[in-house]
Structure formats: structure tokens, C-alpha cells
């Protein structure tokens, strides 16, 4: 018997090519007549465009073309990227143009594309495009943007409110009116970019032989890109193909459809040459979407025993200058706040404010980590005020395992009920508390303090919606070669999607991945699809792959049984052979089974058998599978330098049934590292004129190997009852509890100074300042006495 | 266009005689002119480390060097690490077995950096490995799989050396 591929630590299909330099990333795609593009981008946060002069650029030897909005206009049926997810909450539409025509609203907005024989020449010429601007007032702060007196982000817009909605249930007024304790927190959550190590990129080629345009794009969502590109060009879908090559990390920004995804193909069509554009890191800082600031004003009402009565408040969410995805990000933040806990009443008013900055869209976690942060900060506050242990406050309010499935009185963005499907949240918390030594920490802390060292512990829980529906189709096909082909719109960007699909299919069809080839993220392979976001592909594409594999397995066995004249249940599939269980010498290959149903002109197919070995399945599910977990951290803070040294980090998580433990571990570990960046390092700065001030990786700090501690992983497996595999998503889970756990631990470490943390990230300078303020106040108190 | 010069450079044991524009970076020269696309560019300002190559045996950022500087020198890139087309280097095998890569974009720079490091420090501690790769950014793995792979590779390389 072969070991099962499902559930085991099997090696990845992706690795051999990636380890030997044979990966095929978008910048590795080359054609003999390939031309190279560079974009002219706005250096201003907000300005009117008075004129664009391309003459000098066009005169540079090697330049093939320079295109502005006016040049593109006759070739676009739709000249804006209309991508906002539907919602009744919008107060205005601000869709991105392909190229700015008469106004630029953020630094980095593209105005022209220059195409040349080399990227070097294209950049030379881009610098020669002469743009005359009239400066307009930029809007930098999401809070003042909403004031009546504020300048507007778009000069002809009525105001800067992009959308407004409430997420609410229960009798919130009564909950607060009768509460013995109410505590209010003002939180500022700042967040930077996705910063995959590979930036974005696009290669486009119009092939007159096929009469087809192909776009190779470093995108997480190839089918959406194909649809939008066809719509905007006014071309039939069958004349546009989008392919996701190897992608060097996504983390959110690559799920967005961008102006460059239209400009590059259109330039290729107009020039009759394939065109490549590769985003450089400086562009990534100003042209790839980011997550931005959230300002929370939120209060919690609790009874005498710290049981939650209600939570209410407001959230101002910065949207950036355009709608590049919609209201989903702050909606998820608002929805996530109460998920893990029994909260009888809740009301959060959410306003999305436009600013003259890079558009805001999801980064790993998509607003959910921010919701968890708000909740966990409130619970720490309750513990401090009521002089209770932080873990105890959480234990009293966590939803108990025996209450699953637990219906939250919330509705998802699509109006579906929110049902926590499975899991044991208190148990996950206990696991991390035991592992970190929570109960025995106080004496160690005291001993360290006696030596002038400041240790602290912190913890946080999370529940994360995963597996966003409605579906992700998978097609399986076995041809005369006997090879199993898997096609899916699921896009691979490092999270082992091809291996995941192959494991699931091999589990039904022969038990080996050697016989499988996966085409993920190619619109020519499968008609429909969504792609990678919201920790969804294992749940949605994985389930579809399973259903298709079961169906194909049944068909293969039925045909083989006829051909071998044996009973179906006496057969098994082993590798590329279908054999009789007890006597493997009686066998037929998958390839020959495929030939048997490929048909012969004029001859009948075997009775009752449909043509071909192919199955397409779409597992359809609107409800999300809710993963959960908890983290605990022990760290040391140096009050003189503000340095935070993470000494131990434990995370327990439950993503349902595990398809591949090695890959799940990797997803969690990467998520935790991203969370550490959010908590302590990643700061995307803009000045008052909306100029980015951290636009290199030397200024904007990604965590390195020396900033990332060894992380201890603990697993629980509560299978989700929602899908045939029992799986839940995992890609974003690691991020969720990190910032609140770290802030909790920093406050604990610095409790002698009474330092409070109400923001992410918190930098060493801010920690030092907080300690100094606390010391000054202490001195002032002493003087007053 | 720009001024050109002839250079002779040995990459992965193969000699190249090429005319190159003087302003071309070494990375662009290798990727665009020679088609050696295994070396990746993540930031083009020397921070991320993805483009790291071995230049006469020493790690260097190929995005911060000009191609003409490589005239007369020897370079190792990720394409040259495996001993043969069907056999991986023990470091590559250790990366595969310890999930030392996810998207694989930073991997070429990690591998070249660690080839140099393990050559100079065949029996490292975990902390030494972390310091060795502290100039290489990875957004996927949280580094744990990479560190484990490097320590595992050290053992594998020792075993190869000690084998009779």
C-alpha cells in the first residue's frame, strides 16, 4: 500500500524547478521581439494635468511608442477599472482610469506608458515626458478628510466619504445603559503593504495566427483579469487569455486588477509587438495597493465578573484615492471583532474616507487582524481595570466548544448568516498558556525585574473566516498518455496550490503525484474561476478537486471493470494502473481506459458510458469555514532603547483537517512573521503633502531572519462540517493574533511604568517616549506629594 | 545607444564573450542578455538579497554591480549549484525537505548566500545561520524552514565529506 497523499507530509511539486533556477516567473518570459515598458507616474499627491508633451520622449532612439489617455481612448470600450465589490453602502464611485487624463490623485498614478527596445531606454524616455501640473490641495488624514471644511480628494467630488455602513446586532443602548463598567479605547492601526519579494509584472502578446491576446500577469486572480480586460477592450472572451506564471508571493495586492494590466496589453496591440512591464520596488511602494490607517474609537461594557454586555464604537477606515476592491476590508474588520467571544450586543459604525494616497485593498488577513486587535485590546483593558488575569477574562467570554456550531447574529458581506462551524476556542487558549508557562510566569517576571530586566507575556485569540465562496471549479482530464491533468483558476503564489490539488486528486486516482500535472491560473485551461484570496483555495478548489476525482475514479473503475471483466469493487487504482486487488498482474493502464472511451468512428461506446475521461466539478458553498487559534508570547523590553526581544512565541491553530502538515506549518510561520512586521516594524509613511517617505526597503522594514524568533506551533484538527474534505483555510491565520499578543506582552513588561499601547506598529522610539512620559509623570506626582 | 564594451566572464563554469552596454547591471546582463533568469530581482537597491550571486566565491548583489565589473571574473548563480541536471546539491535537497521555500523568489539568493556560508562555517549554530541570511528577505516562510534547511544541509555536507 502506498501512504496516502492526503494528510501527509509529501514533497512539493513546485520545488525542483524553483530550487534550480528553472522557475518561470513573469520576468522570465522572453520573446524574440519583446519590447519593454516604463510608466510615467505622478510625482504629486494631487494635481490637475494641464498638458502632457511626449515629443522629446518619442525622439529617443529605440523608443517604439508613448501612449497617454488620449491615445488609448479610441481603443477602450470602458476607460475605467470598475472593480468595486457590490454594496449598498457606497456614497460615490471613484474608479481608476487606465491612465490619468486631467487629474492625478496620488503619487505614483500612471499618466503615460513608454515602450522601447529595452527597459533602460524606456526609463530614459519616460523621464523626458513633460507634464505640466497645477497643484491642488492634497488630503492626507482620513479623519479630517471627513470634516465639512476638508478639501476633496477628487476636485469635482462632493465630499470624501466613500461609503458608510453599520455592523450591528442586539440592544446596544440597553447593554451600555445598565453596565457596571464601560471602558473606551482609541486605537490607530497602521498597516503597510504586501511586499511580496517579486513585485508585479505583465507580459502581453497579440498573436495574429490565433487572433488572440495573451497576458501573463503576476496576478492572484487571472479569470477576473481576463473578464475585465475583455470588457474594457471590447473583445470577446475567447480572444483574451490570462495566464498566471510562477508568482513570487502575493499577500493581497496581487489579487487586484491594475491599470498596468490594461495599458501593457493595449500597447502590445497598438505596436504589434509583445510588451513586458516589470514593476520595480519603488513603483511597488506607490503603485501597488496597500492597507492603510484605521482609527478605532471603541468601548466595551462588562458586568461585575467581566462578562461582556456589549461593544460599540466607530471606525474610520482610510480608503486611499480610488476604489480598487471595495468596502470588504473594513467590513471584515468590523465583523471579526466579536467572532471568538460571547458578545450579546454590538454596534460599529464604519466610514470609509478617501485620501490622496495609494488605493487601499486587502493585505494578508484582509482587515480581520485589525478587528481581532481591537477586541483583544479591549479585553486587556477589562483585565487591568478589574484586576483580573488576562487569560481569565478571555476564558469567561470565549465561545465554548460544546456550543458549536454557533450562530452569530451577524450577516456576511453577501447577506449570509455567520455560523462558526466547529472548533474549541478555549482549548486552543489553554494549549498556548501551558506552552508559554503562563501560570508560572509572575515569579520569573519579578526575579527579572529585580535585576532591572523587563519581561512580559501576552496572549490573543482569533477566529478567521476562510474559504470565501461561491465556488472554484476544477477540471480533471485523463488522456491516452495516462497522465492526469488538473485545471483550475486557483492561482499559485507560493502557498503550494499545485501540490495541494495534486495531493487531493492522487488520493482518489492512483496514490501518486508523479502522474499528475497541474495547470493553475490559466483561463485557457478552464472557463471559470476566481483565484487566490481570503484563504480560500484549499477549501473551494480543494473540495472541487475532490468531487471531480471521486467522480472520475468511479468512471475509471467502471470502465476498467468492463474491460477486465471483473467486478468494480475488486479493482484498485495504483499509480497509472487499474489492477485487481489480490492479483496485480491483471491490470489495465489509465491510458488504455482513456483510449477505450475516446471513441472510434462508427463504433458504439460501451453501453452506458459517456465519452472521455473528464470531470468538472464546482463545489458551491456560501458559508465560510471559520478557522481559529491563539497565540502567546514572552518578550523582553529594554526601556532605555525601546528594543523588543521576542523570547518565545507559541501559536495554536485549528484549520480543520490538514492536507499537508509541512505546508500548513509554513503558512502559519509566514503569517506570524508578517504579523511581527505589522506589530513592530512596517511603517508606510506619508508626509502632509501625501508624498511617501518610506519608499525603499531600507526605510520600510520587512522582518529579517534575526528579527523573527523561533516559533512553536501547536495543532488542533476540528474538521469543518461544511465541505467534503473537512478543511478550513490557513494562509492568513498566522497573522491574526500576533500584534495583539505582542502589544499585550509589551504592556505587561512595562507595567511598572504604566505604558499603554494603542497603535500598530509600535517602534522603539515610541516605546522609549512612552517610558519617558511615564517617568516624568511619576516624578511630577512625587514632587506634588 | 549607450557605450558598449566587450567582456569575458565565466558563469557556472561556462565562458561567455559578450558585448554589453556599460550601464547594464550584472543582474540585467545575466537575465536579459544571457537568459540566465534564475537570479531574481526583488528591490534593485541592494536590500532584499534575492539577486545574490557568488563573485569569485564571495556573495555579492548582482543588482548593485555593473556587468563590465565582471570582466575576467567567475560567477556562480543558482543555475550552477546542482552537480548535474538530475541531481540536486545537498543544500537544495535540504531546502526541499525542510520546506525552506514557498514562492521560491528569494530562494536563489538564499542558496548562494548559504553556499558561501556553509563553505566557511561547516558546523554553524542556529543563530549563526540567522545572522548569515539576515541580509536576505523572505516574505513567505518566516525563515524557520530556511534555518532548518541550512542546519540540515550542514549535516548532509559533512556526511558527504566524511564518506569514504
Image (cartoon, helix red, strand yellow):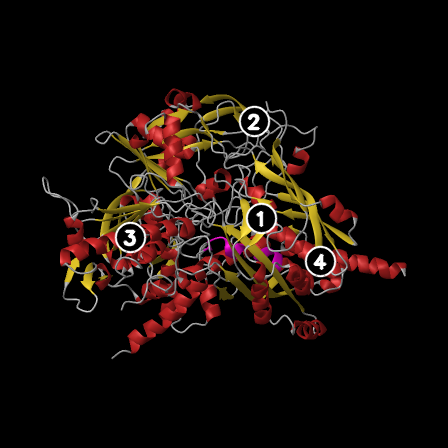
Q: Nearer the viewer, mark 4 or mark 3?
A: 4
Identify the residue at horizontal 44%, vertical 29% (top origin): A98
Q: Can you say which quadrant of the picture contains the C terminus of chain B?
A: bottom left
**Residue position marked by numbered label 2 in the rendering:** A47
Which chain is home to disc 1? A
Which one is earlier in the sequence, the residue at label 3 or at label 2? 3
**Residue position marked by numbered label 4 in the rendering:** A307
Q: Are marks 4 and 3 on the same chain?
A: yes
Identify the residue at horizontal 59%, vertical 70% (top origin): A436
**Residue position marked by numbered label 3 in the rendering:** A22
Q: Nearer the viewer, residue B43 or A575?
A: A575
Residue A640 is at least partly visible in this image: no
Q: Which stretch appears magenta?
A: A728-741
Q: Are marks 3 and 1 in contact (CB under 8 Å)?
A: no
Which one is earlier in the sequence, the residue at label 3 or at label 1? 3
Disc 1 to disc 2, C-alpha distance: 26 Å
Which one is earlier in the sequence, the residue at label 2 or at label 4? 2
Residue A496 appears left or right of A315: left
Q: Are marks 3 and 1 on the same chain?
A: yes
Q: Nearer the viewer, mark 2 or mark 4?
A: 4
Which chain is home to disc 4? A
**Residue position marked by numbered label 1 in the rendering:** A683
Q: Are marks 4 and 1 in contact (CB under 8 Å)?
A: no
* Callout 2 secondary element: strand
Mark 4 Cα-neighbour bin, 10 Å: few <14, some 14–19, many ≥20: some
Disc 3 to disc 1, C-alpha distance: 35 Å
Which one is earlier in the sequence, the residue at label 4 or at label 1? 4
Q: Position of residue B72 (x, y in %)?
A: 28, 54
* Callout 1 secondary element: loop
Q: Is residue A292 above or below residue B62?
A: above
Residue A581 is at least partly visible in this image: yes
Which one is earlier in the sequence, the residue at label 4 or at label 3? 3
Amino acid at each position: 500500500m502506498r501512504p496516502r497523499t492526503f494528510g501527509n507530509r509529501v514533497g512539493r511539486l513546485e520545488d525542483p524547478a524553483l530550487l534550480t533556477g528553472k522557475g518561470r516567473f513573469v520576468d522570465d518570459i522572453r520573446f524574440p521581439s519583446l519590447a519593454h515598458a516604463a510608466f510615467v507616474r505622478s510625482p504629486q499627491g494631487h494635481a490637475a494635468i494641464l498638458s502632457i508633451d511626449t515629443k522629446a520622449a518619442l525622439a529617443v532612439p529605440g523608443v517604439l511608442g508613448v501612449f497617454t489617455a488620449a491615445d488609448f481612448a479610441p481603443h477602450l470600450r470602458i476607460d475605467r477599472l470598475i472593480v468595486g465589490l457590490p454594496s449598498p453602502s457606497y456614497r460615490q464611485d471613484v474608479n481608476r482610469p487606465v491612465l490619468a487624463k486631467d487629474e492625478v490623485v496620488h503619487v505614483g498614478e500612471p499618466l503615460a506608458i513608454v515602450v522601447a527596445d529595452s527597459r533602460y531606454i524606456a526609463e530614459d524616455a519616460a523621464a523626458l515626458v513633460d507634464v505640466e501640473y497645477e497643484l491642488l490641495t492634497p488630503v492626507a488624514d482620513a479623519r479630517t478628510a471627513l470634516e465639512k471644511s476638508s478639501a476633496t480628494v477628487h476636485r469635482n467630488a462632493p465630499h470624501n466619504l466613500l461609503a458608510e455602513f453599520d455592523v450591528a446586532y442586539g440592544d446596544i443602548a440597553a447593554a451600555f445603559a445598565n453596565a457596571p463598567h464601560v471602558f473606551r479605547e482609541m486605537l490607530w492601526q497602521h498597516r503597510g503593504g504586501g511586499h511580496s519579494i517579486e513585485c508585479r509584472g505583465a507580459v502581453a502578446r497579440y498573436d495574429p495566427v490565433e487572433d488572440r491576446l495573451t497576458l501573463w500577469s503576476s496576478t492572484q486572480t487571472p479569470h477576473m483579469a481576463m473578464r475585465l480586460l475583455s470588457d474594457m477592450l471590447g473583445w470577446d472572451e475567447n480572444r483574451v487569455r490570462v495566464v498566471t506564471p510562477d508568482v513570487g508571493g502575493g499577500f493581497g495586492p496581487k489579487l487586484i486588477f491594475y491599470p498596468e494590466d490594461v495599458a501593457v496589453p493595449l500597447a502590445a496591440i497598438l505596436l504589434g509587438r509583445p510588451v513586458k512591464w516589470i514593476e520595480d520596488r519603488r513603483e511597488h511602494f506607490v503603485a501597488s495597493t496597500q492597507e492603510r490607517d484605521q482609527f478605532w474609537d471603541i468601548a466595551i461594557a462588562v458586568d461585575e465578573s467581566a462578562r461582556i454586555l456589549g461593544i460599540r464604537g466607530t471606525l474610520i477606515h482610510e480608503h486611499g484615492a480610488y476604489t480598487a476592491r471595495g468596502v470588504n476590508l473594513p467590513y471584515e474588520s468590523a465583523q471579526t471583532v466579536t467572532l471568538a467571544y460571547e458578545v450579546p450586543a454590538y454596534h460599529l459604525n464604519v466610514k470609509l474616507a478617501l485620501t490622496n494616497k495609494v488605493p487601499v485593498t486587502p493585505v494578508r488577513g484582509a482587515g480581520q487582524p485589525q478587528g481581532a486587535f481591537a477586541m483583544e485590546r479591549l479585553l486587556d483593558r477589562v483585565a487591568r481595570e478589574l484586576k483580573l488575569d488576562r487569560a481569565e477574562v478571555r476564558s469567561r467570554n470565549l465561545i465554548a466548544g460544546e456550543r458549536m456550531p454557533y450562530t452569530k447574529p451577524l450577516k456576511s458581506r453577501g447577506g449570509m448568516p455567520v455560523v462558526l462551524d466547529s472548533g474549541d476556542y478555549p482549548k486552543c487558549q489553554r494549549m498556548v498558556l501551558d506552552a508559554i508557562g503562563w501560570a508560572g510566569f509572575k515569579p520569573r517576571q519579578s526575579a527579572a525585574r529585580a535585576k532591572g530586566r523587563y519581561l512580559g507575556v501576552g496572549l490573543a485569540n482569533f477566529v478567521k473566516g476562510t474559504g470565501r465562496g461561491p465556488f472554484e471549479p476544477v477540471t480533471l482530464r485523463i488522456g491516452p498518455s495516462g497522465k492526469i491533468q488538473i485545471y483550475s483558476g486557483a492561482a499559485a503564489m507560493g502557498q503550494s496550490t499545485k501540490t495541494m490539488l495534486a495531493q487531493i486528486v492522487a488520493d482518489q486516482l492512483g496514490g501518486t503525484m508523479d502522474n499528475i500535472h497541474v495547470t493553475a491560473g490559466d483561463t485557457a485551461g478552464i472557463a471559470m474561476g476566481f483565484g487566490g484570496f481570503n484563504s480560500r483555495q484549499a477549501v473551494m478548489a480543494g473540495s472541487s478537486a475532490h468531487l471531480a476525482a471521486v467522480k472520475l475514479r468511479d468512471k475509471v473503475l467502471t470502465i476498467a471493470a468492463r474491460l477486465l471483466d471483473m467486478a468494480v469493487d475488486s479493482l484498485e487504482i495504483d499509480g497509472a494502473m487499474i489492477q485487481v486487488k489480490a492479483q496485480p498482474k491483471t491490470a489495465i493502464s489509465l491510458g488504455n481506459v482513456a483510449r477505450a472511451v475516446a471513441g472510434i468512428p462508427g463504433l458504439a461506446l460501451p453501453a452506458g458510458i459517456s465519452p472521455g475521461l473528464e470531470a468538472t466539478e464546482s463545489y458551491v458553498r456560501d458559508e465560510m469555514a471559520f478557522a481559529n487559534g491563539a497565540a502567546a508570547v514572552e518578550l523582553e523590553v529594554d526601556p532605555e532603547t525601546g528594543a523588543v526581544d521576542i523570547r518565545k512565541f507559541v501559536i495554536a491553530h485549528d484549520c480543520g483537517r490538514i492536507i499537508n502538515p509541512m505546508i500548513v506549518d509554513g503558512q502559519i510561520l509566514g503569517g506570524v512573521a508578517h504579523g511581527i512586521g505589522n506589530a513592530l516594524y512596517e511603517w508606510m509613511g506619508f508626509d502632509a503633502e501625501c508624498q511617501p517617505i518610506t519608499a525603499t526597503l531600507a526605510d520600510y522594514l520587512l522582518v529579517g531572519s534575526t528579527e523573527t524568533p523561533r516559533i512553536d506551533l501547536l495543532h488542533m484538527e476540528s474538521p469543518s462540517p461544511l465541505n467534503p474534505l473537512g478543511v478550513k483555510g490557513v494562509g492568513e491565520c498566522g497573522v491574526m493574533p500576533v500584534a495583539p499578543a505582542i502589544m499585550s506582552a509589551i504592556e505587561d513588561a512595562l507595567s511598572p511604568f504604566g505604558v499603554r499601547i494603542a497603535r500598530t506598529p509600535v517602534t522603539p522610539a515610541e516605546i522609549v517616549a512612552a517610558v519617558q512620559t511615564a517617568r516624568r509623570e511619576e516624578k511630577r506626582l512625587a514632587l506634588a506629594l | 545607444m549607450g557605450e558598449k564594451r566587450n567582456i569575458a566572464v565565466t558563469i557556472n563554469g561556462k565562458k561567455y564573450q559578450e558585448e554589453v552596454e556599460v550601464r547594464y547591471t550584472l543582474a540585467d546582463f545575466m537575465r536579459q542578455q544571457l537568459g540566465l533568469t534564475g537570479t531574481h530581482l526583488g528591490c534593485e537597491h541592494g536590500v532584499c538579497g534575492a539577486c545574490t550571486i557568488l563573485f569569485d566565491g564571495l556573495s555579492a548583489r548582482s543588482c548593485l554591480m555593473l556587468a563590465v565589473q565582471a570582466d575576467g571574473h567567475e560567477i556562480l548563480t543558482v543555475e550552477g549549484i546542482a552537480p548535474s541536471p538530475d541531481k540536486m546539491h545537498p543544500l537544495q535537497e535540504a531546502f526541499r525537505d525542510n520546506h525552506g521555500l514557498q514562492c521560491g523568489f528569494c530562494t536563489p539568493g538564499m542558496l548562494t548566500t548559504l553556499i558561501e556560508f556553509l563553505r566557511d562555517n561547516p558546523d554553524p549554530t542556529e543563530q549563526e545561520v540567522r545572522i548569515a541570511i539576515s541580509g536576505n528577505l523572505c516574505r513567505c516562510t518566516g525563515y524557520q524552514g530556511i534555518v532548518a534547511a541550512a542546519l540540515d544541509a550542514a549535516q548532509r555536507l559533512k556526511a558527504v565529506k566524511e564518506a569514504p
